[in-house]
Amino acid sequence: MIFLESDYTEGAHEAILQALTRTNLQSVSGYGADPYCQRAKEKIRQACQCPQADIYFFVGGSQTNGAVIRSFLSPCEGVVCADSGHIFTNEGGTVEFSGHKVMTLPNCQGKLDPAQLEAYLARCQADPIANHKVHPGMVYISHPTELGTLYTAEELEQLHRICRQYQLPLYLDGARLGYGLMAEGASVDLPLIARYCDAFYIGGTKVGALCGEALVFPNHNAPKYFFTLMKQHGALLAKGRLLGVQFDALFTDDLYFKISRHAIQMANQLKAGLREKGYDFYLESPTNQQFVIFPSHQAARLSDKVKFSIWQPLGDDKVVVRLVTSWATQPSALGQLMELL
């Protein structure tokens, strides 16, 4: 079976497994007070060029999103995102479970359009009965988006400006951040994200780690009692070292960026092979998620030998199939896929 279903079907990069084995019998303090977490935090601060950053390690993305959004919002506030946003489409009501509304705007190829956001916030502010409604309390974006698309530096700056104007925190979900940073033509890097976002996380689960996300509050601006809030969410890992060791390895010798770049190279190879065989794409994605249009019968036939996601049906008996490369994808797997096609 060829696995192109997602970017977390494998375990972890060998360097991480070696680091976990090498440090396994060392006795250290728990709850993130160990030297590996501290060293990983310092390396992340350097990569983001924000020496004052508060950094916390989580096991997974939904857990991270839930804790951050709850910490930023008052009980009568909601979070604004694109209608394709992960917190709206794929997190089982995590935000709503915490008592907050997800307030959506139409996506523009997966992205939140700055002009639409500004117009929406202006309408909310001018609404004569605004006090009877849920108030926008923060803005959520992801980079890459659910459709593998990327924000430009200009778009991120515009979102930052609008959020400042309306005094709303801007939060970036970075589950696949490495693949966005290393995509060809990308104009957004970690220091830029740290400059324009009030909080963001660096995804490890989908970029080479067994599990783990590194949440960054770049301006020493973590909400009050955030450590305790993590505990309330069941997000405070007693053996915090397990996350610290992994991120220490990922941010040693640029491993995080190197393995992310590998996934992009594999995606580009995949894209070129599909185009050579005459397939069309649902949209242009510069990252590791590729959305290709297959005849429905061919998708059904391939499913016996290839793991992928059916993204959505189209007319004329066609479907959009999502194929995802990762840090672990091998060229041989792509070659096998081309032979099947």
Image (cartoon, helix red, strand yellow):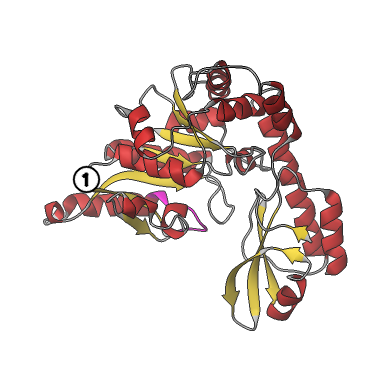
x and y percentages locating residue 226 in the rendered image:
34, 30
Residue position marked by numbered label 1 in the rendering: 75
Q: Foreground: 69 or 34?
A: 34
Quadrant position of the N terminus in the picture: bottom right
Q: Is residue 279 left or right of residue 178?
A: right
Query: Crowding near pointer 1: few (<14 within 10 Å), some, many (20+)?
Result: few
Seen at 44% across and 43% down, the residue is: 63
Q: How many numbered discs?
A: 1
Q: Is residue 158 visible?
A: no
Q: Is residue 165 above or below residue 295?
A: above
x and y percentages locating residue 326 in the rendered image:
70, 47
Question: Is 191 contained in the magenta span?
Answer: no
Dividing the picture into quadrants, the one containing residue 263 is: top right
x and y percentages locating residue 268 in the rendered image:
75, 51
Seen at 71% across and 57% down, the residue is: 4
> In the rendered structure, which segment of residues is drawn in magenta?
107-114
Question: Is 109 contained in the magenta span?
Answer: yes
Q: Foreground: 238 or 86?
A: 238
Q: Amino acid at mark 1?
A: Pro
Specify the principal SS of the magenta part. loop
Q: Foreground: 129 or 54?
A: 54
Q: SS of the residue at dot 1?
A: loop
Quadrant position of the C terminus in the picture: bottom right
Taking the view exactly as shown, the residue that stands out farthest to the bottom is 316
x and y percentages locating residue 318 in the rendered image:
65, 78
Q: Is residue 64 above or below residue 305?
A: above
Q: Is residue 54 visible?
A: yes
Seen at 64% across and 40% down, the residue is: 207
Q: Is residue 230 left or right of residue 310?
A: left
Dividing the picture into quadrants, the one containing residue 319 is: bottom right
